[in-house]
Amino acid sequence: MDGFRVDVANLLVKDLSADLPSEAELAAMDRTSGTHPLMDRDEVHEIYAEWRKVFNEYTPPRCAVAEAWVETLERRAKYASSEGLGQAFSFDLLVADFDAGQFRQIITDNLEQVRLTGSTSTWVFSNHDVTRHATRYGLPPLNGRNVKQGVEWVKAGGPADKIDVDRGIRRAKAATMLMLALPAPPTCTRARSLACTRSRPSPLNSVRTPRSSAVPSMTDSAGMAAGSLPWEPDGTSFGFGTGGSHLPQPGWFARTP
């Protein structure tokens, strides 16, 4: 099915009618009322309602999914409304440890919100902004927000003695099976379907992307989550190209299933 992924869908509308508050003032502002000057403003849904009219002119209607980091399930449900984009990524599983209790509570809460609002949930365990869950699940748990553990490991240089790669891959496969069994759409990119892990290259300045050049800190997070796919078990870039890949790949990609 054809459609669109709307990046940072919650930032499309801003109120710049007054002097921009300081960073500290912005951090203290309520992000759940729909009135924050920079993010998740209620007016954004008027725009997506117009988009939905265009999407529905096609046969079949075009789909869309919001990438919206918002504060509550209720706020996210507005993006998943059938009068708007129709879907919104649920990042709750993405920030959880590999823990049955955490998974159960997150799934229960999301399905209850679906029931109450008539929206939908779109499940995801990783995206391009975080360390892949095949890596995170090979690291010690963090009692929630395990995504942070992945980032810290990357910043430390991706030390092999700090990660259980086989355990991470086993758990990533199990998580994928869970996601596919849940009601509502799952989201799984090719890198995740191959259970690809992630590590920091050495040296760090071997990262060669326009984004990493403009924002060096991106090499510690998003850049390290968007590494090239392994197409073959050997070669300079595992089949990505003859001149090496735009992001270095860890050696264990040679045995990625």
Image: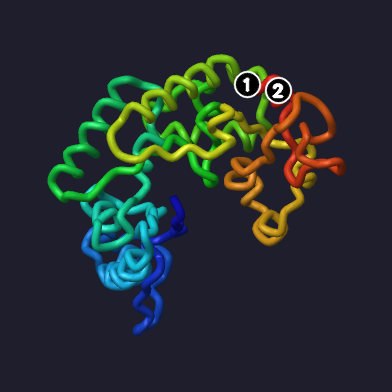
Which residue type carries mark 1? Pro
Q: Earlier in the sequence, mark 1 or mark 2?
A: 2
240 left or right of 194 in image: right
The residue depicted at 44 percent of the width and 35 percent of the height is 125
Residue for point 39% across, 82% down: 19
- Give SS at disc 1: loop
Res. 36 in view: no
Task: Decide: few, some or many residues near mark 1? Use Cα within 10 Å; few <14, some 14-19, many ≥20.
Answer: few
Which residue is denoted by mark 2 in the rendering?
252
Amino acid bearing label 2: Trp
Compared across the picture, whether 175 is left or right of 232 comes to left
Q: What's the distance in space between the residues labelled 1 and 2, CA to CA?
A: 10 Å
Q: Which quadrant holds residue 30?
A: bottom left
Q: Residue at x 54, y 45 (%)?
A: 128
Q: Which mark is residue 56?
A: none
Q: Quadrant of residue 40?
A: bottom left
Q: Nearer the viewer, mark 1 or mark 2?
A: 1
Q: Is residue 116 left or right of residue 132?
A: left
- What residue is disc 1 on? 257
Residue drawn at x 54%, y 33% as measured from the top left: 192
Relative to 90, is 56 above or below?
Answer: below
Badge 2 element: helix
- Residue at the outermost left position: 116
Q: Is residue 92 visible?
A: yes
Residue 247, x across and y down, in percent: 73, 43
The quadrant in which residue 186 appears is top left
